[in-house]
Every structure is written in C-alpha cells, then in structure tokens.
Amino acid sequence: MLLFTPGPTPVPESVRLAMATPTLHHRTAEFEAIFKEARERLMRLLGMDECVMLASSGTGAMQACMLNLCATKALTVNSGKFGERFGKIADAMGREKVELKYEWNTPCSVEDVEKALLGNPDIDAMFIQVCESAGGLRHPVEAIAKRAKEINPNIMVIADGITAVGVEKIDVSHIDALVTGSQKALMLPPGLAMIGLSAAAVQKIGEGKDYYFNLATEIKNQQKNTTAWTAATTLIQGLNAIFDEIEKEGFDALYENTMARALATQAALEAIGFSMYPQTPALSMSTVYDEDAEPIRKLLKTKYAVNMAGGQDHLKGKIFRINQMGLIPVYESAWVVNAIELALADLGRRAFDGSASRVFNETYFKKA
Ligand SMILES: *Cc1c(COP(=O)(O)O)cnc(C)c1O
C-alpha cells in the first residue's frame, strides 16, 4: 500500500535503520554530540536565530508558542482545522483572541489582518499556518507578516510550518516562530516538534511561561546540547539520518522535485476533469474538490493500493488530498493519478484513455 496521506509520511529505510540502534541515555556526551549535530542542521534548515526541539506532536509546539509568545491578545487565522486549533489553544490557555474566519479554500488577506491589528492595538501575537492542511491551502504568510510588523514592530508572528518546512524555502524575515513537526515533510515517525525562533522572540520569552513547555528553560538547556526533560533520543537520531538522506541531493533539489510533482499532479487531475479545491494551492498536498469523492478514495485503497486522505467536518466526502511531502519516487506519484483515472472508469464516470499519466509525465519531464 502506498501511503499518500499528507502526514504521516513514509519513513525511508535508512532512517528506520538509524533508529533501530540500542537505546542511548540522554545525559551522556555521546547523545549530546548527536543533539548538537541535529540542532545545527535544524538551525540551518529553519534559517532562524534560535531553535528548540520538544518531545511532543506538532500541537505541543503550537501551544508552547501561545504560552510563551502571547501575553495579552492573540490574532488567529482560521481557514481550516489547524487555524481553528490556534483559536482553541488561545481559549484553553485563557488568552483573549480575535479570529479571522474563512472558508477552507480561501487564504487570509493582508487587508483583513491590517484591519484587525489597527482595530485591536492590544494584540501582541498573531498565529497563522503557512499551509492550512485541512484544505491544502497556502496562506500569503510572508506578505501578512511583513505588514503586521509595519503596523506593530513588537508583534510576534507565529507561523505553523508543519506542512511547509521541507516543502519549500520559507522567507522568515518577518517571522518570529516557525513551528514544524517530525511526521510530515521531514519523514520521521510522529513525536518530535521543532520551533525556529527570532532574536526578538527569544527576548520576549524572557523567563518563559508554563512548566513542561517553558521555552526559556528549553533554550537554556538546548544551547548546551541537552534538553530540560528526557529528549526524544530516537527521533533526534532519526533527524540526523533524514538530514543525511535529504542532503544527498540537497534541500533545493527536494524543493524543486516537490514543486514538479505537485504541478504535474495538478495538471493531470485537471486533464481528467477535476478542479483544485483551494484558491491558492499549497505544494505540500494536492487537494481536489469532488461532490462524490469518497468512492474514489475507497477504490484507490481497496483496488489500487493507494492510501490518500479525505476531508473533515463539512468537507467529509467532498475532497481528497494527495501528499507531495518528502522524498517521493516520481513513479509512485504517476501511479496515483493513473489510479484515480482508473477509478473514475470503474465508477462509470469517465472512459479511461490514459490522459492522467500522459499529462503527469509531460508536465513533470518537460524541459525548461
Ligand atoms: C499535522 C499538522 C499539525 C500538527 O498536528 P499534530 O497531530 O499535533 O502533530 C499542525 N498544523 C498543521 C498545519 C498540520 O498539518
């Protein structure tokens, strides 16, 4: 079965093997050397002044940002489940919030953020996804962050890049916290969350808030190549192994390949009559709207050995999402669009003529 859900993604064999070594104790020089290497590589990937690794799923890092970087009022952007989650975290942590709410195919606009910030000068932190995974949507985070900082240079801009880091190079010039997780584009098992931080964010964290998610405590420890609590040792070994794997060709090659697969998938799906769901599709996943999506997804699983994701809430049964994150062999992606075309024929919706894989290949292998 090909795992084509937008997280978790398949873990490469070299990485699985690197995590199969005997358990290390975390308070040892041996592990500190591994941690140091992972930290340096992560810092380069995120391109920020500081970073921390947390033993938690991605949501833990989202919560850590709310606790440590928002003191008065949060601005949250809800274009789907993950943006909604920032709002729920604000409520749970007792932070006042202003929420900008959109349909799941609609990106947040610079103007709406501008209006919210001018109308609420007490907002001290804003929270947004780079890619909102609920509908495979790319927000214009860079432009929004830039405008937010013009309005209030002290505002903290927290970007959830869980389905963006490792997909594309993100301009972090105006971002104070860039959140990511292990199980998406970094192709590791779930359980490690990472946050890149700006110097301004480190300053605002100060003494830190919370106990487990006190980022000041983590920064102090991680600068010494250790962690406040027991480190996710195995996943951090895996992180070095995935860096080894990606760096064989380099991150730029991964970004280029991800884009090529995403664009070829989109062209192939459009060639057989589908439309993309989001107004601004992300490169991390290809999301198609279809009134009768569920039978297609079921057939892919039962007949064509492809596991792709559906939709949640009001989009249940109305979309399917094809992963593009990670080192995906191109022949797998070509099979996925072909399988979708075959499923349409099985369902009596469209005669099979091989258009999907032809257009996929023409687009992917087109020479510039
Ligand atoms: C997967 C994901 C998360 C994190 O979810 P966890 O289940 O807590 O790891 C957060 N934001 C986005 C956009 C995601 O896709």
Image (cartoon, helix red, strand yellow):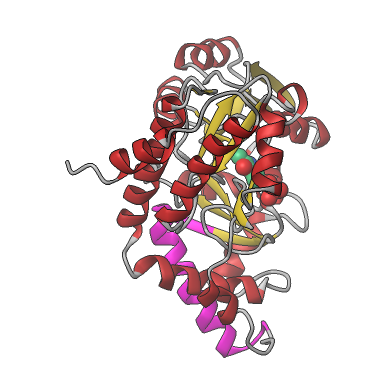
Residue visible at 45% across and 19% down in the picture: 151
- Pick the residue in front: 41 or 303: 303
What secondary structure prevails in the magenta region? helix
Between 331 and 85, the residue placed more toward the observer is 331
Farthest residue, direction left? 368
Q: On screen, 30 above or below 80?
A: below
Q: Nearer the viewer, residue 267 or 58?
A: 267
Q: Quadrant of residue 363?
A: top left
Q: Find out whether residue 264 is within the magenta segment.
A: no
Q: Is residue 361 left or right of residue 132?
A: left
The quadrant of the picture occupied by the N terminus is: bottom right
Horizontally, residue 275 falls left or right of residue 368, namely right
Seen in the picture, residue 337 relative to 116 is either above or below; the reply is below
**Image height check: is 106 above or below 268?**
above
The range drawn in magenta is 26-51
Q: Is residue 64 visible?
A: no
User: Ligand 1 appears in which quadrant?
Assistant: top right
Res. 174 image quadrant: top left
Image quadrant where one finds the C terminus: top left
